[in-house]
Amino acid sequence: MITLNEVSKLLTDCRLSIMIKNSNTYVNKQRIMNYESWKIIHDKYCPMLYGVALEICPVKKEAEQLLISSFKHIYTQEIIPEKYPAYCLSLMRLVIKTAKELYPLKFKNNFRLKQFENTPLLNQFICEEIGFQDYCKEKYITQHEGLQLIRKELNLLRTF
């Protein structure tokens, strides 16, 4: 799994590349995520994201590379909890999207996360990046009915 030291090095590398690209020092200072933010994101989400990465790429080295690339995206795209209400979902989607970019030939179609195999709707939201409103339109259901389906699947996850 990616260590906090690797995240710290990644933070430094990203900081330098952003400063080279953007000469406005004030903007650079505003964009640079501090170490404490990275530590919180790492400690809270890295084990879960590493599990997703291992499910996509069973080879440990490839999974770690996927996780490092995903953290680069988190930093460069400023994916911080304050901007994303469903932060965990956003991070899982990011790892899957990054895997598709890094390993397009290895990434199988209709990929499903094992921990969500009994919840097809949640799996679809995560793996296929379909939006809630689009799903409701596609299935010809109201948003209320869609929310009921999500609630059922969440309750099903809690029982396992």
Image (cartoon, rainbow, N blue to C red):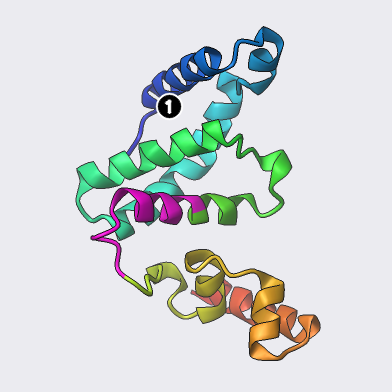
* Mark 1 closeness class: few <14, some 14–19, many ≥20 residues within 10 Å: some
Looking at the rendering, in which quadrant would you find the N terminus?
Answer: top left
Residue 151, relative to residue 60: is it above or below? Answer: below
Residue 30, relative to residue 61: is it above or below? Answer: above
In this view, which residue lies farthest toward the bottom?
140
Rendered location of residue 157, percent (x, y): 54, 73
Residue 147 lies in quadrant: bottom right
Q: Residue at x 46, y 72 (%)?
A: 116
Residue for badge 1: 7
Judged left or right of residue 100, residue 14 is right
Q: Residue at x 30, y 68 (%)?
A: 108
Total labels: the figure holds 1
Q: Is residue 96 magenta?
A: yes
Residue 7, relative to residue 20: is it above or below? Answer: below
The residue segment tinted magenta is 94-108
Q: Residue at x 24, y 60 (%)?
A: 105
Tag 1's secondary structure? Answer: helix
Rendered location of residue 40, percent (x, y): 57, 32
Q: Is residue 128 magenta?
A: no
- Kind of residue indicated by mark 1: Val
Q: Residue at x 59, y 16 (%)?
A: 22
Judged left or right of residue 19, residue 56 is left
Front residue of this view, candidates 139 and 123: 139
Rendered location of residue 36, percent (x, y): 59, 22
Front residue of this view, candidates 45 and 61: 61
